Image (cartoon, rainbow, N blue to C red):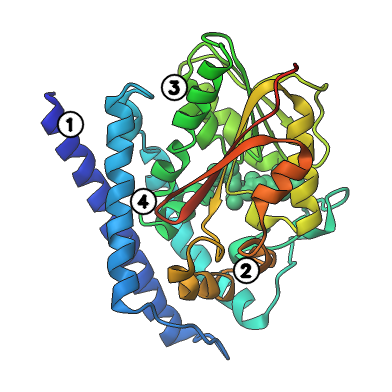
Amino acid sequence: MPDTMTKLAYQALQQGKSYFGLAHKTVSTQVMQAVNPPKDVQTTPLDIKSLQLLQQRMSALLERDWQDAEAGIYPKELLFDNPWDDFFRFYPLVCLDLPNIWDRFNQGSHQTFADDIDTAGYPKYYLQNFHHQTNGYLSDMSANLYDLQVEILFNGTADPMRRRILAPLKQGLTTAGITEGAKVLDVACGTGRTLSMIREALPKASLYGVDLSPTYLRKANETLTAQPGVLPQLIQANGESLPFIDNYFDGVVSVFLFHELPAVARQNVINEMYRVVKPGGTVVLCDSIQRLDSPEFEAAMENFPTMFHEPYYRHYTTDDLNLRMTDAGFEEVSNQIHFMSKYWVARKPAVA
Ligand SMILES: C[S@@+](CC[C@H](N)C(=O)[O-])C[C@H]1O[C@@H](n2cnc3c(N)ncnc32)[C@H](O)[C@@H]1O
């Protein structure tokens, strides 16, 4: 397919995802208002200027996604990588689960797990129904629905936002003189979306993923096994205490983790990333924008934890992760913003 056609196809796919996400949210909100209206919830509607800015930033994100693919940072096929099987299998279940979510929302019940789920051994801060998810991160069903729920939340831009870690990661490896066979770790790899992108961008790399959720790791294993390429090593572990020796990885990444951690855990994870990355190695983090850099989206950042159960988000939006990274020992900490995500790129000092 000529490039203009490919670009048009990509734009059409994203447009479709965006309309789908908006339609899903509009219809589900109307049904919720009719059958189980939320009690005592105060949210601030976004003004027209913020909505226009959001639209501009989304277009800029998609343009950047295309440009990075054109520049060969990852293959263009990645732009079309969509788990359609999962969509058709699990979208009806996403809808069927909504009444449970509304019930928990209205009852303010945020730490509810089915009796057959073993909650022993996890940090207390983790045992939450984040986003009002049924059984938090601890059931197979949650793992099956998660990617779809996130895509709907972000109107189809979750993957383009994840892909923004690939350019700085590759750049960092090149600067360190690593051309092949890099060792790269994804902390809180969830269902493996980011690992599968890194595998496309760095086909010769040895990949590792850790996550606290055994069911998300099982899902990641299933998905990554079904696709070609060397299988990443997946390990159940807490990012605060990584099961690796010092100075082992050339690159460490993490996507959408830090807003779900309390402050102390955020610092512990950053310290651990510093420990396991080699001198001269690169760390790239991606998470929500913050009040520090995006005051124009104050209302959106205020509404998010009100509507979705995100107990650590408000503090996260004011937390200076640049400072946390330099405190850990990183240097050359820089930031980027793409749509609703912020990125931290940092280097561990090379040994003199
Ligand atoms: C919002 S999800 C992000 C998952 C994935 N990185 C993505 O891009 O979708 C947060 C993930 O962090 C994991 N998690 C939360 N706290 C953790 C911790 N202390 N150590 C390891 N994983 C953790 C959860 O199990 C979940 O998979």
Please identify the residue farthest to the front as the structure is shown: 352
Disc 3 marks a residue whose amino acid type is Ala
What mark, if any, has residue 156 been given in the picture?
4
Distance CA(mark 1)–CA(mark 4) = 18 Å
* In the image: residue 187, left or right of residue 288: right
Task: For the C terminus, give its image quadrant.
Answer: top right
* Mark 3–mark 2 distance (CA, rounded to whole Å): 34 Å
Position in image of residue 244 (x %, y %): 80, 24
Residue at figure coordinates x 28%, y 61% from the top left: 55
| Residue at the disc numbered 3 | 201
Q: Quadrant of residue 262?
A: bottom right
Task: State the SS at label 4.
Answer: loop
Q: CA distance from mark 2 to mark 4?
A: 21 Å
User: Is residue 159 in sight in this rendering?
Assistant: yes
Q: Which residue in the protein does label 2 denote?
A: 309
Tell me which label, 1 or 3, sits earlier in the chain: 1
The disc labelled 4 sits on which kind of residue? Gly
Q: Indicate which disc residue 6 carries.
A: 1
Q: Is mark 4 within 8 Å of ligand 1?
A: no
> Mark 1 and mark 3: span between their CA atoms?
19 Å
Callout 3 crowding tier (Cα within 10 Å): few <14, some 14–19, many ≥20? many
- Is 51 left or right of 211, judged from the image as shown? left
Position of the N terminus by quadrant: top left
